[in-house]
Amino acid sequence: MSTAREQPIFSTRAHVFQIDPATKRNWIPAGKHALTVSYFYDATRNVYRIISLGGAKAIINSTVTPNMTFTKTSQKFGQWADSRANTVYGLGFASEQHLTQFAEKFQEVKEAARLAREKSQDGGELTSPALGLTAHQVPPSPLVSANGPGDEKLFRSQSADAPGPAERERLKKMLSEGSVGEVQWEAEFFALQDSNNKLAGALREANAAAAQWRQQLEAQRAEAERLRQRVAELEAQAAAEPPAGSEKEGPGQSLEQLEALVQTKDQEIQTLRSQTSGSREAADTAEREETQQKVQDLETRNAELEHQLRAMERSLEEARVERERARAEVGRAAQLLDVRLFELSELREGLARLAEGAP
């Protein structure tokens, strides 16, 4: 292919697709990245072509004829049929604005091709392209994805032996309504799937949080039991009485001296006992009060954790119910989508039979 005598009059960036020749239903992408798609004008032959190159290979080489029609199937996707190449081309744009610009230029080029054909049939010369086409370049724009190519899309071939204008308009309207309905059902189905995935993620997070709360609750209960045992040990130790000191008698001492000595020793023992018991009781009391305070704090914390656990379990139950409801809605939507796809398939077959039977 040589474009030495042709001049580009419009260029843009888009993802390029071709209809699957085997199924005539699915789109086959021409590559992973967006390609440059350009309108070329051959002033020598008064011919307009749409060309897109992938390396050294021509992905699109479509001559625009007055019988062609560019159809917008979504906000960012459009298609046209080339009877000469026996295929249907699809373009996915970055925005609706780029799609609109390409569609408007397609209409201008189509009108110019019609005028060129009429003048060539009349034997005249076409001095300038129709509708004042001027060479300009649309800056390339990054593309993220195209709406629709991955799924089934309706299409219609345009050829020279197509039905009359009224019949073509009626078929075009029916196809457009079917495509719009299918896109709406697909959007609703994917929205339900996204909602279901979000609910499943929230349920997993809630389950993980509940397991963490259960582990903390068990740890707090174990700590409370240990402190209770410690309090019981301290109380038992405080209740125990210290052993009494033994008395010693000295030989050769008189009864009075022995009694006085016994009284003195008893006083010393009482003094020591009171001092020891007082200090021990004070220490035990302080430790017991501190331990009891910790136990009370732990019991309060346990009560709070149990309350939070019950609230979390209620939330889990609500999320589970919501997930089941969303799953049921997704199932109903999938069934409705299958019904719609079946109806669209029957409509396509009917339209194909109608087009074949049209004079």
Image (cartoon, rainbow, N blue to C red):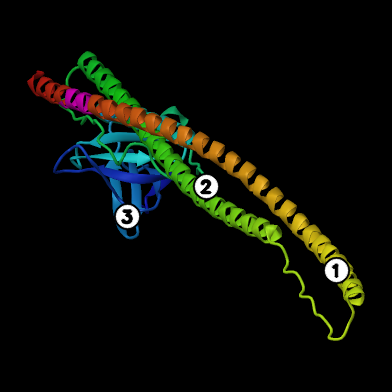
**Element type at mark 3:** loop
Work out whether residue 252 or residue 98 is closer to the camera in this orientation and state it: 252
Residue tagged 3:
2
The quadrant in which residue 146 appears is top left
What number is the disc on residue 109?
Answer: none
Residue sticking out furthest to the left: 357
The quadrant in which residue 244 appears is bottom right
| x then y, percent, for residue 196 | 38, 35
Work out whether residue 28 or residue 163 is closer to the camera in this orientation and state it: 28
- What's under tag 2, amino acid-wise? Trp
What number is the disc on residue 213?
Answer: 2
Q: Using the image, determine if residue 176 lies above or below residue 293.
A: above
Work out whether residue 1 or residue 270 is closer to the camera in this orientation and state it: 270
Q: Using the image, determine if residue 320 lies above or below residue 140.
A: above
From the viewer's perspective, tell me whether residue 97 is left or right of residue 167.
Answer: right
Q: What is the chief secondary structure element of the magenta stretch?
A: helix
- What's under tag 3, amino acid-wise? Ser
